[in-house]
Each structure stands twice: as structure tokens, then as C-alpha cells.
Image (spheres, grey):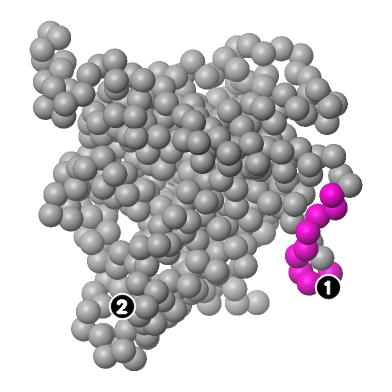
Amino acid sequence: MKEKFLAYFEVEKLNTTVRREILAGFTTFISMAYILFVNPSVLGASGMDKGAVFTATALASALGCFLMGILARYPIATAPALGINAFFAYSVCIGMKIPWQTALAGVFVASLIFILITIFKLREMIIDAIPSDLKYAISGGIGLFIAFLGLSDGGIIVANKSTLVGLGSLSVGTTWLTIFGLVVTALLMVRRVPGGIFIGMVLTTLLGLVTGLIHAPSAIISAAPSLKPTFFAAVKHIGDINSIQMWVVVLTFLLVTFFDTAGTLVGLATQAGFMKDNKMPRVGKALASDSTAMLAGSLLGTSPVGAFVESSAGIAVGGRTGLTAVTTGVFFLLGLFFSPLLAVVTTQVTAPALIIVGVLMAANLKNISWDKLEIAIPSFLIVLGMPLTYSISDGIALGFIMYPMTMIAAKRGKEVSPIMYLLFFVFIGFMWILNYK
């Protein structure tokens, strides 16, 4: 039995050990455990019950990790993705004034489409058709958007009537709490301390409690919060997807999650040395795993689930098999019993995490061919468009519309795939419908 277990996960073949895989799984978990507290905070802005979102986040993350570890056998963990959860809360629910129940229904429909196009291998075809430069731009742009959210939530950047945005007041105690968290987390990350983001959040919380800027919780451990407020709300409101605007939202969930997850999977596979001839082995199973987790997450009550870039922490300490992801999933289940800590995880505590994750995602910008204007211009529009329009989808649309035109101008139109030309027209329609007043 033990031999079959080790053989299935290719422990010896990949020159690792069960102990190392478990350590890698724990390292990945403490590197991304902040999502248990950040996700309820972000989605809570849409009116969702934070306790229910906490439980949904833990369960959906665990399921995705188990599928990725057992089915795809990759040391890649999954959880509700940062960036798309901000789109869910701020762009869809607050910006478009769409009820969160309807938005969840949109995630549910998008996940069903995901599963279908995964079965027919269309996701693999589209991934191959998107130029690598634009993939890097999308990841980097989402990083800037997340960082901007963190700076805003922490009070470091505020609205300004004269200049649109400006530096926040340094006389506010909570702003200094954010600054402390940012500095500490940055130093921990520079020193490559495992779980630096999570440790930074803990230290920021402790400082907030000591100074009275954060009120102490009534307990630390308790039963998992009820899922009742969000459970199956997506199915109950699927009939609300009856307008062009809502189908645009579904398409956006589909596209943004698609590009974010695809880029993350490729990046992590490259780090771990899995890529062969620019192809990712078992990519179909990996995509099926995150699609299923996304479907389950929408039913439980959370925004789209996808591969997490913090998995790089576990890979960095030697994680190479699915055991790493399975271990991370187990820790997510254990995390269910720490929901009272939600009360002390304020926006000032989570803001530094958002900013640092933004830095990690922005690292992909170095891979863009900035010396070629036909590539640089659409990439730049994607990167800058996301934070300035306060919309991930708008940023993607700007770049994808510009790309075929600049390539044709550079006499490289034949290098643009038919799928990219199709997306050109899709995004023109997307922008017109979404922004036409």
C-alpha cells in the first residue's frame, strides 16, 4: 500500500520525501492563510455575510487543493483569487448595483461554461493562442490593481478632488498601522521568511490590539460559521441572469478567471520544472480541478476559485508532488475553527497583504518585450488600465482591442491568431455594452 501511494504521487521519481511534501504544504498554507480573512473582508463590501464567506472560502479552497493534489498531482494550492473577488464586490455589486446573490449566479454559470470548455479542451487552445506578453501583462495589471486596493483600504491613498487621488493623512492611527504592517511584511519577504505575509498580518494585529486601534475578539476558537446565508444562493438566483449586462458579467468572470489561473499555473509549473517543450503535462486535469472548485465555491458562497501564486512558497522549499496540495487542503479545513479572529482582521491588517501580493504579481512585467512597441503598447494599456479604470475587465479589454491593430501596423498581422482576432471583436462589443450610457 505504501509503495503504491509513493508511486502514485511519484515521490521517489521527483526526488522528494513525504516529510518534505508535508512541510511544503504547511509552508504554502501559512503563505496564503490570509485569504481566509481577506476574502470575507472584500466580499463583505458587497453585503455578503462575512462568517458564511469565511466558511465557504475554507471549504472551496480545501476541495480545490484536494482535487489539484490527487487528480492533477501538482503542488499547487487553490483558493478564491484576489483581484477577481475585488471585481465581484467593487465592480459588479457596488459599481453595477447588482445583488451579490445574482453575482454568485454569474460565477456559477461561468464555472459551468469553464467545465464544458475544459472537457472539449478549448481552454488549452485559447491559452496557447494568447501571446505570452499579454498573459504577463494581465497578471502584472491585476497585481497593480490589488496593490491600489490595499493602499486605499489602509488609508495610505485617499480620494482628492484636485488630483483624483493623493496621500492620506499621517495623523490617523490606523494609517500608521497599515504602514507598520507593510514595512514588517516587506522585510519578512525580503528575508524570505516562510509565511511572511501571514506573520506580518499577525504582528500588525497584535500591534493594533496593544494600541487599542483594534478591539479584542470575544474568543479565538469556535465552531465554523453557518453557510446558510450564502449556501446555494447562486442556484436560487440563476433566473436573474436575464440581461445583456449580466451576460457580460458572466463573460468577464470567465475571461478574468481564465487568464489569471492559466498564467499562474504556467508560472508555477515553470518554477517547479514541470514544463516540457513549453507545454504543461496534465494541464487538462489541473484545469478540471480548478473548474470544479470554482463551481463548488459558487454554490457554497464565494467568488471564483483559482490557482494561488503563493504556492511558489511551498515549491521553493521542495514541494514537487500532489501531497503538498493535499496537505494545504487539510490545513484549510483546520482553519475553519478560527473564525472569531475575523473581528480583529481589519482592512488595515489585510491592506499590507494586498500590496505585497501585488508586488509578487507585478514581477511578471519583466517578461514583457518592452522594446517592441507593438507588444509594449497593448501590454501597457492592460497594466495601467486595470487600476486607473478600477476594473480588471476594462484593462484587459483595452489591451486586447489594441493588440491586433498594433501588430498589423508593425506588419506582423499574420502572427496574430484567429482567436485573438475573434477576441478583438468580442471585447469591442464588451466595452460598448458595458460602458454605453
Q: Are marks 1 and 2 in contact (CB under 8 Å)?
A: no
In the image, what residue type sits under mark 1?
Ser
Counting from the top left corner in percent of width and height, residue 425 is at 38, 78
Question: Residue 199, labelled with which disc?
Answer: none
Q: Quadrant of the N terminus?
A: top left
In the image, what residue type sits under mark 2?
Tyr
Residue ID at (11%, 15%): 4
User: To which residue does mark 1 refer?
Assistant: 162
Q: Report the magenta residues as a range.
A: 161-170
- Please state which of residues 99 and 359 is positioned toward the viewer in this rendering: 359
Residue ID at (37%, 67%): 368
**In the displayed structure image, the side of residue 174 where residue 287 appears, left or right:** left
Residue ID at (85%, 39%): 173
Counting from the top left corner in percent of width and height, residue 381 is at 50, 73
Residue 312, above or below 396: above
Q: Is residue 277 magenta?
A: no
User: To which residue does mark 2 refer?
Assistant: 421
* Magenta highlight: main SS: loop
Residue ID at (16%, 15%): 5
**Residue 70 falls in which quadrant of the image?**
top left
Residue 36, above or below 216: below
- Please state which of residues 64 and 252 is positioned toward the viewer in this rendering: 64
- What is the spatial separation of the Cα atoms under label 1 and label 2, in whole angstroms? 40 Å
Q: Quadrant of the C terminus?
A: bottom right
10 Å neighbourhood of mark 2: few (<14), some, or many (≥20)? some
- Please state which of residues 296 and 80 is positioned toward the viewer in this rendering: 80
10 Å neighbourhood of mark 1: few (<14), some, or many (≥20)? few
Secondary element at image label 1: loop
